[in-house]
Amino acid sequence: SSSSIEFYGTSLPSTNIYPAFVFGTLTYLIIVFCNSLLILTIVVTKRLHRPMFLLLVNLPISDILGASGFFPHLVFSILTQNRMISPPACITQAFLIHLYGTGNILILNAMAYDRYIAICHPLKYNTIMTSNIIIKIILFIWILDFLSIAALFALTLRVKLCRTNIVDMYCNNPSFLKLACGDITVSNIYGVFLSIILMVGSLLTIVYTYAMILRTCVMTNNADAKKKAIQTCGTHLVVYLVLQINTTFTIFSHRFQNVSPFLRRAFGVSILIFPPFLDPIIYGLKTKELKESIMMFLKRHMGSTK
């Protein structure tokens, strides 16, 4: 269908347009800056070229993808007060957002596995987590992410659209399918199957790895190692839980008619704001080595511009 799609939204009073535009633009710029800083610091700092950080660097890449799928169109629609989007642009936005959500969950699982090996099997760590294995894990994450989401949208693109009002503030697969008038059974089954495999699989991985880590921490006599392990894992766990709770609620709220649309939209938007905004701050401040490297990187580059 070539007709434009209209987002859910309320027109802002003219006095609120520019403050909302500035706030949205600043939020996006801060997200891009903080995540880019994290990427650059890890890339240029030789001592950070270790499995934990090589896996972590994928998180800000994914966060930038998600934020770039959401914010540019949002601030444009605030400024112009135009809530229309073309179907190809809608699919592109939805593709980026789903790529980000799935990518983050897969990356956080790989990071949990890395911490599990480091803390529970420290003597085997260097033989298991070799550079070769890390490259394979990273490639596996992105290929699996891309193919699973590409398959989701290959099914979605088969349906005929006969409605034009998206029920959310951005395009995503469940809200896009609500515009269809044909049979969407296959798309729905694949979407639910993918969500359940991803959520349950990742939850089992996280529960197992962190239970083993906790057991090892309780049994160790080294107070410093215990503190460092709990701090690192606590950081991962907070980031994972924020993403998992938000994602689970947003995905399954589309399946139930009695869920408040406001609540669904609030959770849906918060997925695209909080993880990209908080991830670089949480990891940058909580990981001592990373914090020191970021400070050195900034000093070196701020100093060279003077």
Image (spheres, rainbow, N blue to C red):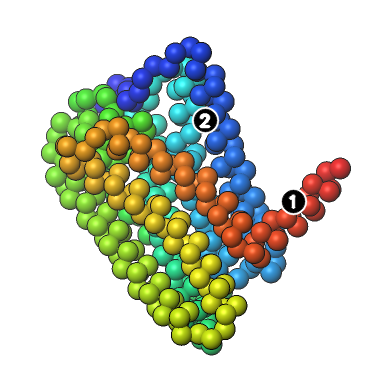
Q: Amino acid at mark 2?
A: Gly
The residue that mark 2 highlights is 24
The residue that mark 1 highlights is 298
Comparing 96 with 50, the one in front is 50
* Disc 2: CA contacts within 10 A as few (<14), some (14-19) or many (>=20): some
Residue at the spot x=39%, y=16% of the render? Answer: 11
Q: Are marks 2 and 1 in contact (CB under 8 Å)?
A: no
Q: Amino acid at mark 1?
A: Leu
Residue 166 picture quarter: top left
Comparing 106 with 121, the one in front is 121
Viewer can see residue 118 = yes
**Is 227 displayed left or right of 155 in the figure?**
right
Query: x, y percentage for residue 85?
Result: 37, 25
Residue at the spot x=52%, y=52% of the render? Answer: 279
Query: x, y percentage for residue 40?
Result: 66, 54
Comparing 74 with 95, the one in front is 74
Q: Helix, strand or loop at disc 2?
A: helix
